[in-house]
Image (cartoon, rainbow, N blue to C red):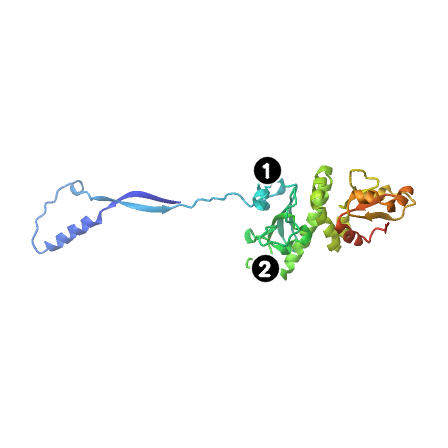
Amino acid sequence: TEKTVDKEVDDDDDDEEEEKKDDEDGDEPKIEEVEEDEESKKKEKKKKKVKEVTHEWDLMNKQKPIWTRKPEEVTKEEYGAFYKALSNDWEEHLAVKHFSVEGQLEFTSILFVPKRAPFDLFEPKKKNSGHIKLYVRRVFIMDNCEDLMPEWLTFVKGVVDSEDLPLNISRETLQQNKILKVIKKNIVKKCIELFGEIQENTEDFKKFYEQFSKNVKLGVHEDSGNRAKLAELLMYHSTKSGDEQTSLKDYVSRMPESQKDIYYITGESKKAVETSPFIEKCKKRNYEVMYMVDPIDEYCVQQLTGEKREKK
């Protein structure tokens, strides 16, 4: 802030005029009376007012970045406000993961899962869509770092603050950066952990799966390293699940001893596969059949080689 104050100072101009006058009269002899109290008789100097400009610095942002604080110190309201500012979403987030990684490399991150999928989730990538913001030692580097997230996780919003990346890093060098690849691997792992935490709450997981089931299935198809963990998130309607969906784990737990394979049927809709004559034989043998009515299901199930399966 800039401040202007009026300040009184000695008027040096008058002194200069007096000195000049004395110099002009210097040749003439002068008689001066010296009084005892010379100081009391001394002529007071004239004062003049001048404007003095001063500058004071005010610290506008006194708060530390939210991701540098300990998770237990951050309130739910603070996470909510940060998520809305980060994503421009009008709703609260569904879940959040706040963590730090230390060791060979160090970084801090906050990841948010929205309550709703954006309408353009599977449209071609848009510039500056702002999925993950990249910081290096609290200095903002990039608004949308696509190299930090695989395509199937583009719905996750958040920030990543690295201690190891160089400040002058560019998009071109990011693609070849080994540190970034390790960060990406850790973020994917933490996202899957977050989905597992959501799964512990039936209602929250139902909302999550309604919005992002296609993303999970795409992850099963594309991410071979995390396929087994992602398969635990899959949910399907079946001949025994009624209106609810069942997981592969629950399906296997209900299998009779005589059943050695997992049975599923593909079709355009639940109504179409429910009335299919192909499942009658399984019903008679008390075998449960899962309904796979999403086009991506066929690609997804082809990758699930860890489970025995048979298509009817």
In the image, residue 25 lies at what x, y percent? 10, 54
Q: State the quadrant of the N terminus.
A: top left
Secondary structure of the residue carrying tag 2 is helix
Q: Residue at x 55, y 59 (%)?
A: 168
Distance Cα–Cα, label 1 vs label 2: 34 Å
Residue annotated with mark 2: 171
In depth, the one of 193 and 199 nearer the eye is 199
Residue annotated with mark 1: 77
In the image, residue 189 lies at what x, y percent? 70, 50
Residue 247 seen in the current view: no
Q: Contact, CB < 8 Å: mark 1 with mark 2?
A: no
Q: Amino acid at mark 2?
A: Arg
Q: Amino acid at mark 1?
A: Glu
Q: Residue at x 61, y 43 (%)?
A: 70
Query: Between tags 1 and 2, which lies in front?
Result: 2
Q: Residues within 10 Å of mark 1 (few under 14, many from 20)?
A: few
Q: Residue at x 16, y 52 (%)?
A: 19
